[in-house]
Amino acid sequence: MRILIRKIGVLWCFVCFSCVVIAQKTTRIGKWHETFEEVIYTDFKAAKQLAFKAIFESEKLQNDTLLLEAYTDISHLYLQTTQLDSSLHYTDKALDYAKVLGDREKEAILYNRKGKLARINSDFKIALRLHEKALYLSKNIENRQIEVDVMNGLAILYNKQLEKAKVFKVLEEARQIAISIDYKKGLAENYNTKGLLLFAENQDNVENIFKEGISITKADGNRCLEGIILSNLGDYYLEIREDAKAISTLNKATNVAKEVGDRTTLSYVEMSKNIYRDHIGEYQKAVVSYKNILKEYKQILNNTQRLQVYWLLSGVLWDTKAFEEAFDYQERYIYLNDSIFNLEKAKEFENLRTEYEVEKKEHQIVTLEKEKALERSRKQWILVSAILLILPLIILFLFYRNRAKTQNTIRLQEQKLHAKEKERLEQEKALKETQALVAGQDKERERIAKELHDGVGGQLASINLNVSHINTSLKHPSLTAVNHALKDTFKELRALSHDLSYNYHQDKSMYQLLAELKQNYTKSHGLLIDVSIFPKDCLQMLDVYTKHNLYRILQEVLANTAKHAKSQHVSLSINRHEAALIIVLEDDGIGFDVNTQKGGIGLKNIRERVMSINGKLTIDSVLGQGTSVIIEILTDTVHQ
């Protein structure tokens, strides 16, 4: 009986301890979210680190509420940094959790965010529907801040749709609400939007409106929005040819954007500065800057911005008498402009075609009704004859129209399938080439291991035997020391040949290989390595090829850490998440600048091996704060 009571007590203590640990983790994730809200407009890098930490920990706990917060945060960050596809992906994931949890406030925020993304992609009808959904929800839960954000977005959308009567009415209503609840961010965005609209219409008071918005952002500490409004005010000064004010304001915008890490605003400001350089005749500086924009900001430039750069660059090149290069960029401008024009025309044509079809059907209905009304006054046989004449024509028309639609749909599907198949074949070809390269490297490693073991190892063993035999009679201390040194060298050579051997790793589990790695680097370099695996069995189903390459990747990363990072502690986390295996290796070393550091052979080998197992590699490092290496391997590679 006492034993039973003791077991129950132990079990109760374990349950209590687990609850305390989970509560502590939940509190820590909550603090990360609060810190994210503080730095999202001041430090994008810090915000990104906090968001990803929250996602990893929340997924371990499988806490839906925490996952909703984490996915909402990362989608917000990606929107701020104009990574639109990633923002939409995480917005949809967060929206699913919000619906399950019944969190109407988060639903309103996320619907408004999806509306903004749709508006940026010029899907105005979808954007309007999403904004209206968000506005309905925000009014339903009486959240005035979200209501202000939605109304600011609706004003921009109405302007895109040329509904001028609604634009300033909605903006004024949003401004009054923001003032009444002291919502500084919404009020600053309201002034920024109003300033841009008045600027586009060449109206007065633009400068005062922008300055009011800047004053509010400073009071609110929203550095990101401050940089955006400063950039817009600088553009306004350029437009009215107050160049001194313009360059001063644009320099302020540059400093703020650099501080925050807002590359989007930096690209806008640099383009504006080039317009100023064009004004004062600094054509060569403008040429260099435009080319740098196309190179450094190519990931965030949309087609309209890239079109503007091509046009302005060709003009500046013309001013520098570089006519051939100017003509080249002008051709690029024409080609891209035609592409954009064709896309827009295709959309317009589709809308017109739809409207035409609707009007055509309505007209047919009206015509038929008139005909029926007319036929009622005639004799029955005339009515029957008319119906028998018209009905086959309608059926024939619908049949041919439906067949044309079906053929067009089939043709489009075939084109999409062909494009996907072509892309898949190209990816398979690149993967096979990488796998062949890695296989060749492994084969060479195996040959070297065999040569070391059978050749040099055999010779060392023979030398050691001869020394031992000679020393049997001499008993000389120096020969005894040589004998021991040869034995130690032979052991190290044998360990090296085993480490290079593919077959040696093939016979061991990934858990054993990780333990050996940890032991070797702790012993040889004094690294303190923490290994976390969740769930515990996530490595059991690795096939031999993936296991071997993953071991080599981790070995190479640890070698680089030991050689360059000056690190004392390394954390290795391996987690299975949905359809992927996520490996995160972090150190507390000196870090490096990932934008300027050139990759050596080791980094090249790591990338090739990650590619060979259909994986994705991300390296994030900050000077003085260590380095994080994230490897994501898809499920079809992870499992046998």
Image (cartoon, rainbow, N blue to C red):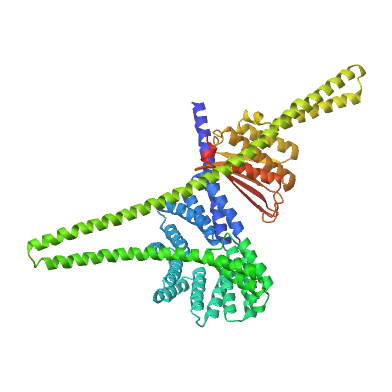
Residue 625: x, y in percent? Answer: 68, 53
The residue lying at 21 percent from left, 67 percent from top is 366
| Vertical placement of residue 45 versus 14, above or below | below
Seen from this angle, which residue lies furthest left?
Answer: 379
Q: How many marks?
A: 0
Residue 637: x, y in percent? Answer: 54, 39
Which of these two is toward me, 251 or 136? 251
Q: Looking at the rendering, which quadrant does residue 494 occupy?
A: top right
Which of these two is toward me, 83 or 50? 83
Residue 87: x, y in percent? Answer: 50, 57
| Vertical placement of residue 241 versus 144, above or below | below
Is any part of residue 110 visible from this angle?
A: yes
The residue lying at 63 percent from left, 73 percent from top is 318
Report the side of 477 relative to 162 (left or right): right
Which of these two is toward me, 170 or 390? 390
Which of these two is toward me, 389 or 332? 389
The residue lying at 58 percent from left, 55 percent from top is 48
